[in-house]
Image (spheres, rainbow, N blue to C red):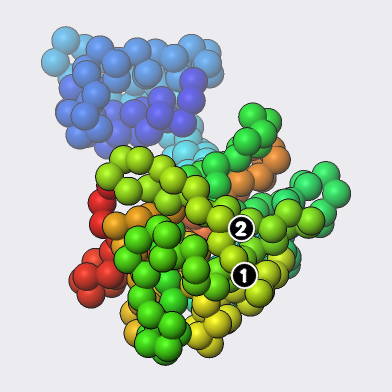
Amino acid sequence: MNVEDLRIVINVAKFQSIKEAGEHLSVQTATASAAVKRVEKHFGTELFIRSTRHLRLSPAGERFLPTLEHAFNMLGNIEQEVRNQKDQIEGEIRLSVSSDFGRNKVLPWLDEFMAQHPALRVKLHISDSNIDFYRDPVDLALRYGSPKDSHLYGFKICDVPRILCASPAYLQNVGTPSALDELQHHNGLLYQLYDKVYDHWALEHQGQVTKVRMHSNRASNDAELVRRWCVAGKGIANKSLLDMSDDVLAGRVVPVMPSYSPPDSQLWLICPTRQLITPSVRLLKEFITVKCEHIFGLLKQQGYFPISR
C-alpha cells in the first residue's frame, strides 16, 4: 500500500465505480482494482461491497474512509513540505572567483542573485591563484579552463573567446599592428602566475597556431591590473572577452588583429564533491549562464564578436 493506492480508494468511494475512478485518475481499471485490493489486504477487511453492476461502501468502509481521507491529506502535505524544503534556496555559498572577472562581473551578479534569494549567505574568495579545495576555505570555484583533476565535479558554463585588445589612444600614438612581426614591437601587458610570466602568446590564424614572444614593461599576478593598464593605454592585452566586454562595448578598448585569435577558453563552475551540488548551486549556475549569454548577445549585436575560426 502507498499514497497512490489511498488516492485510488478515495476516488473509488467518491465515484462508486472502480472504472470511473480509474478514468478520472488516468489509470487502467485493472490498476485501480489492484490498488483497492492492496488496501483491503493491508487492513484485513473489505472496504467495498461489489456486485456485477454496482459498488458501495461496506460498513467497515463507511467507518474508516474519513480516517483514510485524513491520512491521505496529511501525507500529501508532508510530501509538499519536503519538496518545498528541497527547492528552498538558502544556506551558505563559499565561492572562489578570479580577480578581474570576480570583481567586475560576478560581484554585481551575486548582489542581484542574493536579492532574489534573501536566505542565501555568500563568502567570496577572490584570487587568480590555483584553488586547493582541501586547503582554501571554499566549496566552489568559478574558473577559466576545464578542470584537469578527474576527481572534481563541475558544470561548463560557456565557451569564452579571448582577444587581443588595446585602447584607441595607445593605437593612435604607437600605431595598429597588422602582422605578427609588427605585434612583437608593441608593449605586451602580461599576466604572471607565481614566478612564471606569460610572455609567449599563442595566436591562431586560418587554422595555424603561432607563438609570439612579447616585449613588455608591465606584468602582474592580478588580471584586473592587466585590464586597467590596457584601458589606460599602456599596451596590448591578451584577455578573456568576458573580462573586457564592458570596455569593448563602451569603446574604451578595441580588438587588435582580430583575425589572429588566442585560443578560446571555457568557463566552469567546479567543486570537490557531488554533495556540494545543491539546488542553490544549480540555480547559481543557470543564473551565471544567462548573464554570460546576454553579454555575448550584446557583443554580437555590436559586431564585436571575434571572427569564427
**191 or 187, which is in the foreground?**
187
Q: Give the percent coordinates (x, y) of residue 98.
A: 63, 63
Compared across the picture, whether 206 is left or right of 271 comes to left
Q: Amino acid at mark 1?
A: Ser
Q: What element does badge 2 sit on? A: loop
Q: Is residue 244 above or below residue 73?
A: below
Q: Is residue 171 above or below residue 57?
A: below
Toward which corner of the image does residue 28 lie, by quadrant?
top left
The structure residue drawn at horizontal position 40% and vertical position 29%, both measured from the top left corner, is 4
Compared across the picture, whether 256 is left or right of 137 comes to left
**118 or 178, which is in the foreground?**
178
Q: Is residue 62 above or below residue 170?
A: above
Task: Say which mark, if any, is on residue 104.
Answer: none
Q: Give the percent coordinates (x, y) of residue 122.
A: 68, 68
**32 or 66, which is in the foreground?**
32
Q: Amino acid at mark 2?
A: Asp
Circle 2 packing at 10 Å, graded few (<14), some (14-19), many (20+), is: some
Residue to which mark 1 is pinned: 216
**38 or 168, which is in the foreground?**
168
- Disc 2 versus disc 1: distance between alpha carbons? 8 Å
Q: What element does badge 1 sit on? A: strand
The structure residue drawn at horizontal position 37% and vertical position 19%, both measured from the top left corner, is 36
